[in-house]
Amino acid sequence: MSKPNIITIDRDKKFSESALWEFQRSYFDREGIDAWVKDVPHYVTSNPFLANCYAQMTVRLVQDWVRKYPESKAHPFYIMELGTGSGQLSYYILKKIRELKKQLHLADIHICYLMTDFTESNLKFWDKHPALHQFVEQKMLDFAIFDMEKSKEIILKKSGVKISENSIVNPLIVYANYIFDSITNDAFTIKDQQIYASLVSLSTEASNMKHGKPVSMQQVKPTYTTAEVRENYYDNPVFNEIIHEYKHLLKDSNILFPIAGLRTIVNLKKLCNDRMFLVSSDKGYSIPAELENLGHPYIDFHGSFSLMVNFHAIAQYFEKTGGTALIQSPRPGIKTNVFYSGLNLAELPEFALSIHEHVMRLSPGDYFVLHRNIRDNFPQVPIESLVGHMAFTHWDPHIYRKITKQVCEQIVKADKEVVDYFAQCMPNMADNFYYMPQAYDVLFDIGLFFHTIRHYNEAIPYYEKSKHFFGERFDLIYNLAICQYNIGQVKEALAGFRYSLTFKPDSEETMKFIEYIENTEGDNLL
Ligand SMILES: C[S@@+](CC[C@H](N)C(=O)[O-])C[C@H]1O[C@@H](n2cnc3c(N)ncnc32)[C@H](O)[C@@H]1O
């Protein structure tokens, strides 16, 4: 057998200068919203449970701040989401913030959510999204291109406002989910109380290359060598201090250094006059014990690729520049960590309490671990517990998708209070539907739920919504016709049954229905 022809893509490059990052950028730029349809896992950082945690902390900060500084009411509070992606999380957070503002009598305070990303295609998707439109109209939402590797300023697309040191009066709130691991990182090796830069070489088979780029990132093989780290390795003395401290903090390991993330933090801290609250959820390492004994960076390819975030380095940066890092106690699952500067938690008690409740006590990671266990056992879970679980998920369509069949099978024999609870919360779940290409049609499932419990009047609007987003098909038109028949709209039902035959001409049940209606209704149909 002939040996495969191996191509070297990169040789002994600083990790941050590796071609990996350019491939990553072009992947997100090229795929835009399709990245989520195809391969990039995003449920864990974009669900209603996590949205509730972030919204609660944010609104409590705003509430405490205006109580302490009443004059701050005259200025907007900006929330900036970095590397926003699909916008699903933004939508859930916006809804929750609007609800909390109302409940807490904060309606007169202007909170403006900035969805940002480096690629124009995501911004275009948000701009046309029907669910986001209402928030733009209410001046709660604006968009901006913000490239964490390059941008120095933020210009809002809708209002034209330029965010600068002079324009931001209140603390800047920043959300950074699943992003510090997806933009440029450096890598270091620590051994015998020395630190070395990890240099990466990339190679792949020639057959995996097209127009100078690898077709499949999974088939790109990284190998590593080391090089000396000179005294002023970075132009930022705090970064240098942090990396050199690892010589004494760790014995033998390979670590990442989230250089683009840290530069973004420096930049944003400056823009907001060093008054910032940052919350980030991701897989990563937060304490030295977790950073010890690691191999070279594990690159998790899934269309794009992701790494493990070095939250410890981010925490160090905040601590060394007068801020604070609240690192979640170690636990399984993704980590949610909070960083702030220019805020005194002793003066912001509701905010402090909400961090305790939503990050330290029951966090998005706890939710996911618990949910995954229940999800793996759904068939054994009785319907009374399923409804409780749906409440725990904040009526998340992504979860209902997995139990819809089970619910429809069991609901007909369920206690009235279970049926009523489901029925009462279905509108909340419909409101959590966020359209994306190839999104799951939970609207049909909600229609089916009401149909199954014979609430035909309530089923029809959901079937209609399903038609609006996902188009006509046999099941939908047929089910709609049944509901119409059951509420006495016989002519419409007959037309519907006839029309459904265009999608499935040999449907015997449809033909029987048509025959039955024609025979029983006779002259009434004229
Ligand atoms: C892995 S996704 C995470 C999306 C979202 N935050 C989530 O949790 O699902 C990374 C996102 O960051 C964006 N991105 C990549 N490089 C970026 C950069 N340099 N500046 C800003 N956004 C970037 C991508 O377009 C993509 O939307």
Image (cartoon, rainbow, N blue to C red):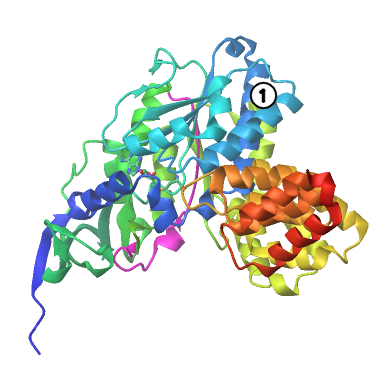
Instruction: Judge whether 412 appears above or below 35 on screen.
Output: below
Q: Is residue 299 left or right of residue 326?
A: left
Q: Is residue 37 left or right of residue 420?
A: left
Q: Quadrant of ligand 1?
A: top left
The residue sitting at 64% across, 43% down in the picture is 465
* Residue 70 figure quarter: top right
Disc 1 packing (10 Å; few <14; some 14–19; many ≥20): many
Q: Would the CB of label 1 be found within 8 Å of ligand 1?
A: no
* Residue 417 figure quarter: bottom right
Q: Quadrant of the N terminus?
A: bottom left
Three-letter code, disc 1: Gln
- Residue underneath mark 1: 63
Q: Quadrant of the C terminus?
A: top right
Looking at this rendering, what residue extends furthest in the bottom direction? 1
Q: Of 486 and 29, which appears nearest the observer?
A: 486
Asked if residue 508 is among those painted magenta in the image, a careful observer would answer no
First to last magenta residue range: 274-300
Q: Position of residue 165 (x, y in %)?
A: 39, 17
The answer to whether one can see residue 446 in this image is: no
Q: Position of residue 463 (x, y in %)?
A: 67, 48
